[in-house]
Image: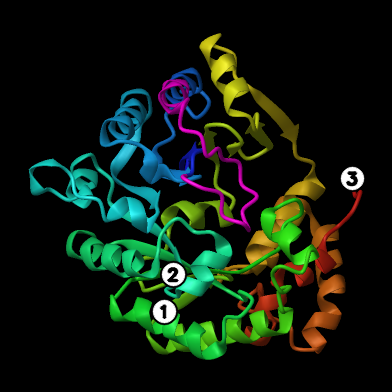
Amino acid sequence: MAGIYIHIPFCKQACYYCDFHFSTSLKKKSELVTALVKELKLRKDEFKNQPVETIYFGGGTPSLLTIDELELVINTVYKHYKVKENPEITLEANPDDLVSVRAQSRTIFEDYLKIGINRLSIGIQSFFETDLKLMNRAHNADEAKACLLEATKHFDNISIDLIYGIPGLTNANWLKNIETVLSFNIPHISSYALTVEPKTALDSFIKKGVIKNVDDDLAQEQFHLLIEKLEASGFVQYEVSNFGKPNYFSKNNSAYWQGKPYLGIGPSAHSFNGYERSWNVRNNSKYIASLAQNILPIEIEVLSVTDKYNEYVMTGLRTVWGVSLEKIEQDFGKMYKDYLLEQADSHLKNDFLYIDEGKLLVTKKAKFLSDGIASDLFKINLY
């Protein structure tokens, strides 16, 4: 098994653009942690004897959990699963949680290291107050810089999130955001275009004219500025939205993109065992109540051959590993390989795709369009 993802569905406040599952009420936090532990115990045989390579606390805002709560979950994994030596253990965190100082003059970073967390993924998004207020982030620009200043004293393996395409974000300020990150020698950056998800506050504000709509052309321009700046600084764009220095690629996320099995724990968390996808109920109360009765609140989908082909094409084209034509033929048959090449032909001719050492890859100029290109290669209802 590649790893275990643990979803922590709590946030101090709702970011206007977010459509992930979370709650701004922390009343059931301790009950939720108890339920997480219970689910880990109940599912311990699903990937029996497969070593756990990564443990990833995502959310939501996992940094809202106390050290004791985090340690309890980590210890439960070690007790009931076969954990690889020196696994990658990542905690997603917000800057405002990381600048707090704990007892005996210790920082929160020392406590994280003590319980085994060795990688931080920090949700910066921007270093400009106007951007942070527009997105309703819980931290401010000073806290963003202060947390990185302190984090880099204790952690070597740090990833930060940045968002581009924000209404009002100029190319000049976008470059300043990137340069600020580089000044802290951060080895990994995840960067995403601001997207307007249905039924979010951002969607409502744009429809009412309170906030300007996202400019896709500007977002694409800032995406290419990002690539140019980071590649010049020694980063590898190993996935469309992820850039890492050598030896700092996310092991957890790389496993997803390479189709390795993983276990998802917590409300709304997804799992994959190689032939089935499953997901937990997207409701904290129902999740807690179900686990209290030793019942897994889970739904399962058995993937067809076509489903697996489509997923491999989608994830492969987003990465530096591309789509292996040999793997397509071995796993799905010559008919799928022929179909893939037929569908890819126009994109090969217009220099959006290319083939290198038997792998189908997206050209640099077309990376922003990767998902759309992948959808052109999908197969529908082939049995």
Q: Nearer the viewer, mark 2 or mark 3?
A: 2
Mark yes or no: residue 55 visible. Answer: no
Q: Distance between the Cα atoms at labels 3 and 1?
A: 41 Å
Residue 379 seen in the figure? yes
For the residue labelled by badge 3, is the local secondary structure a helix, a strand or a loop?
loop
Residue identifier under label 2: 189
Quarter holding residue 338: bottom right
What is the crowding at mark 2: few (fewer than 14 residues within 10 Å), some, or many (at least 20)?
many
Query: Where residue 337 sits: x, y (%)?
Result: 79, 64
Q: Quadrant of residue 63?
A: top left
Secondary structure state at the residue bearing disc 2: strand
For the stretch drawn in magenta, the main secondary structure is loop
Q: Which residue is mark 1?
A: 235
> Going 31% across and 27% down the picture, which residue do you hit?
72
Left or right: residue 350 compared with residue 112: right
Q: Nearer the viewer, residue 177 or 239?
A: 177
